[in-house]
Amino acid sequence: MPRFMFTHTPLAGLVLVERQRAQDARGFFSRFFCADELAEAGFRMPIAQINHTFTARKGAVRGLHFQHPPHAEDKFISCLRGEIFDVAVDLRRGSPTFLQWHAEILSAGNAHSLLVPQGFAHGFQTLSDDCELIYLHSRPYAAAAEAALNVRDPRLAIDWPLPFTDLSDRDANHPLITSEFTGI
């Protein structure tokens, strides 16, 4: 039995990863990440940094964050507790899906992860209280390369499933996309 199932989304390079579980009366076993198995499927992702987040309230939003080249990064996002609406926005210059977004439901129960490639912004909304996420990053955080999109930007028109309950001042005040923005 394969340990991972890969589903390509409408945005090239953005992939839903279903981690297969072996279950019995004791519980379950699931391989969380395996660089070799992902490489066999065509995904190469060195891990340079791992981040862990906890968000207490249902409806909270974080994002939409990215790093400019040469610090652009791949991310492998997983929800360890709770349930989230996970969003990726294509920022790749010249991409046929430039500024389009795609979302997946990630939860502890469904054992899904989202492989977000370089050139995408990422954010999420919690669909339950007490959500924990693990992010695997292919590059370390670089403050000078950090940037973000406004989660309420009308050009993106993200269909957030719930009213916002928590949004940091920082995330609420990220700039709107201008006509001069041609991608990263």
Image (tube, rainbow, N blue to C red):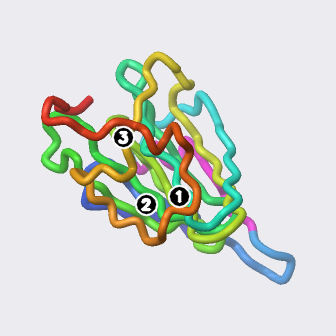
Judged left or right of residue 73, residue 182 is left
- Residue 63, compared with residue 161, is above or below; it is above
Mark sitting earlier along the chain (1/3) = 1
Amino acid marked by disc 3: Leu
Does residue 101 sit above or below 27 in this rendering? above
Label 2, on which residue? Answer: 16
Among numbered discs 2 and 1, the one appearing first in the sequence: 2
Q: How far apart are marks 1 and 3 (CA)?
A: 22 Å
Of residues 173 and 105, the one drawn nearer to the viewer in this rendering? 173
Mark number for residue 113?
Answer: 1
Mark 2–mark 3 CB contact (< 8 Å)? no
* Rendered-image quadrant of the N terminus: bottom right
Residue at 41% across, 50% down: 41
Q: Nearer the viewer, residue 26 or 160?
A: 160
Tag in front: 1 or 3: 3
Residue 146, percent from left and from top: 45, 26
Mark 2 or mark 3: whose residue is earlier in sequence: 2
Pointer 3 residue: 149
Region of the chain picked out in magenta, as a range: 29-41
* Quarter of the picture holding the C terminus: top left
> Which residue shows up at 52% across the image and 20% down it?
143
Q: CA–CA distance between discs 2 and 3?
A: 22 Å
